[in-house]
Amino acid sequence: MKILVCISNVPDTTTKIKLTGDQSAVDLANAQWIINPWDELALTRALELKEASAGKIDKVTVITVGDKNAEPTIRKALAIGADDAIRVDAAPADAFAVAYEVSEAAKAENFDIILCGIESSDYNGSAMGGMLSEFLGLPSVSSVSKLEIEGDQVKVNREIPGGNELVEPETPFVAIVQKGIAKEPRIPSMRGIMMARKKPLNVVAPAGATALTEFVAYQPPQPKAACKMIAAENVGELVELLHNEAKII
Amino acid sequence: MSNVLIYTENFDGKFKKSTFEIASYGAEIATLLGGEAIALSVGNVAEDDLVQLGLYGVTKVLNFANEGYANLDNQAYASVVASAVEKENASVVIFSGSTIAKAVAPRVSVKLKAGMVYAATGLPKNLSPFTVPKKVFHGKAFADVVIKSEIKIISLAQNSYGVVENPCNVVVEPFDVPANAPFKTRVTNVEKTSGKVLLNDAEIIVSGGRGLKGPENWAPLEELADILGAATACSRPVSDEGWRPHSEHVGQTGKIVAPNLYFALGISGAIQHLAGVSSSKVIVAVNTDHEAPVFQAADYGIIGDVQKILPQLNEAFRKFKNEN
Ligand SMILES: Cc1cc2nc3c(=O)[nH]c(=O)nc-3n(C[C@H](O)[C@H](O)[C@H](O)COP(=O)(O)OP(=O)(O)OC[C@H]3O[C@@H](n4cnc5c(N)ncnc54)[C@H](O)[C@@H]3O)c2cc1C
């Protein structure tokens, strides 16, 4: 069995977001780049499954679509424990284009389970995993908060509004994963970092996807008015303000 | 092609406010385009409920009640939506911002080669080029996104447009698709956490952080939620510690919520937490530390020990509820 984990290279979640002077782009010149938090959890789960599989899962591959600047991030995924990596050498234009590139690059290898994070923490698209599954013609399960393999059957937990469903997909399939899929993301060990240098990172040419959307302008959020402080001895004032001033209760 | 197709979700056969919100939103876009607002309902919804969509500008409801589709299968549902789009010549497809939108909409996008914007924050700013506003970096910036394809898919961020009444004559039409291959996913068990207000529907959310010190201190917080008809939520460490269920975790890596009123109790207001709650209309913070970053995001603040303040809040809100 082979697992593919899709990795998005995103600015660290604490990055201050500044816009370029003409507001046509986000200025990320000084950002630290990380593995998208959900993708990191997906990778962690993939490695746990491999370790528990007694050799049945022989490989965990990571893939990203990005230029050379994305390499430290994909190397980090190797250092965490992935066996090999693919970088599709193209700028990630939009979810549609990224999903198409991944689908083309993934076709050659017949992965049994493909894991994607439910969202990327930069442009908050929530679309790539679903699009990938459709390009590949594979079943998909979204909002997956648990994934187990029992014998030959994959069982996943899907969070639904107000509950959970146990879903059994046929494989190969795409799982779009969220919180809960793994407890804590793994961090690379010293040994992992050393080993990652020798692991294969295959750079492949893009298939030539066309993006269907384009981010043309940005605005900063509206500044917020100062917080009104209420004395701890007088919480009744809060109720009064919420009622008469904010008119929210 | 200027019709708008609205994918409506029901919960045990009933529509919720979020459904009426996307109906209102889709109807306004249809008006801008000079077309009709057509709703697609998947599942078992009574005629009396379906026609409610007419109150919000919908003129036709495609009623897809095929029993074979009782459980969500992303692939099969996407085919249903795509055939409805084709049948109605829709040029815009609207989804809510819910889990089903994340599951189905991206597949429809590929089927129809339709560009998609997830979690749009308002009406298109421009029809040509078709430009939709959305939040990026979890609200640290906003972006205008041009959708270049002929068919456009928009999922609307909850509570970003509102419910707008616009009564119309509405017809309900049965809708079906030719039988397709058996589903490749099987639902073998469903667990519902009943009786509680769901986070994503809640108008008011009462949320607790590590400042509550331990799971045994949640009773007064739950009491406040009860008094206000609110949902309960928590910060990430609280769910990581197992003090509260994962489904309550809000923030960048948990649920993104946008209630009218959000109580942050004993929550420091880390940037990743605020990312999930900053669209709330009003934020109230209670914290012992006057320098906690949460006060920068809050509208109203109280400096003090949450365990002492909560019983007072409960008393004050209960009194208010009794009088109003
Ligand atoms: C990649 C990434 C993603 C993350 N995603 C999320 C996310 O989705 N959601 C999330 O919440 N966090 C997230 N975090 C974690 C986040 O950075 C914070 O660590 C977390 O939000 C802090 O939770 P807290 O406010 O409950 O706890 P703390 O930061 O420990 O704050 C507790 C607060 O309670 C106050 N306090 C203490 N005692 C009392 C008292 N008796 N009465 C009143 N106040 C008191 C303290 O002054 C303090 O401000 C993420 C972090 C990373 C790195």
Image: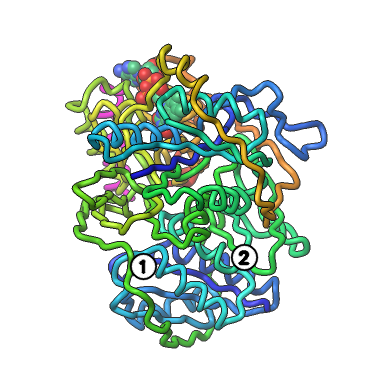
Picture coordinates of residue A168, whole percent (x, y): 26, 57
Q: Which mark is residue B113?
A: 2
- How packed mark 1 is, by other alpha carbons closer than 10 Å (few <14, some 14-19, many 20 or more), is some
State yes or no: Cβ of the residue under disc 1 lies below 8 Å from any atom of ligand 1.
Answer: no
Left or right position of A194 against A21: left
**Res B133 visible:** yes
User: In the image as oriented, which residue stretches furthest toward the right?
Assistant: A22
Q: Amino acid at mark 2?
A: Lys
Q: Which residues are magenta?
A: B303-324
Q: Chain of mark 1?
A: B
Circle count: 2
Q: In the shown orientation, is residue B299 left or right of residue A206?
A: left
Identify the residue at horizontal 32%, vertical 54% (top origin). Answer: A160
> Dot 2 lies on which element?
loop
Question: Is A151 left, or right, of B86 in this rendering?
Answer: left
Circle 2: is it few (<14), some (14-19), or many (20+) Cα within 10 Å?
some
Q: Amino acid at mark 1?
A: Asn
Instruction: Tell me which corner region of the image, top left, top right, bottom left or bottom right, holds residue A38.
Output: top left
How does the figure colour the protein chain or chains?
A: rainbow
Please state the horizontal and vertical placement of residue B45, each as a whole percent of the image.
33, 76
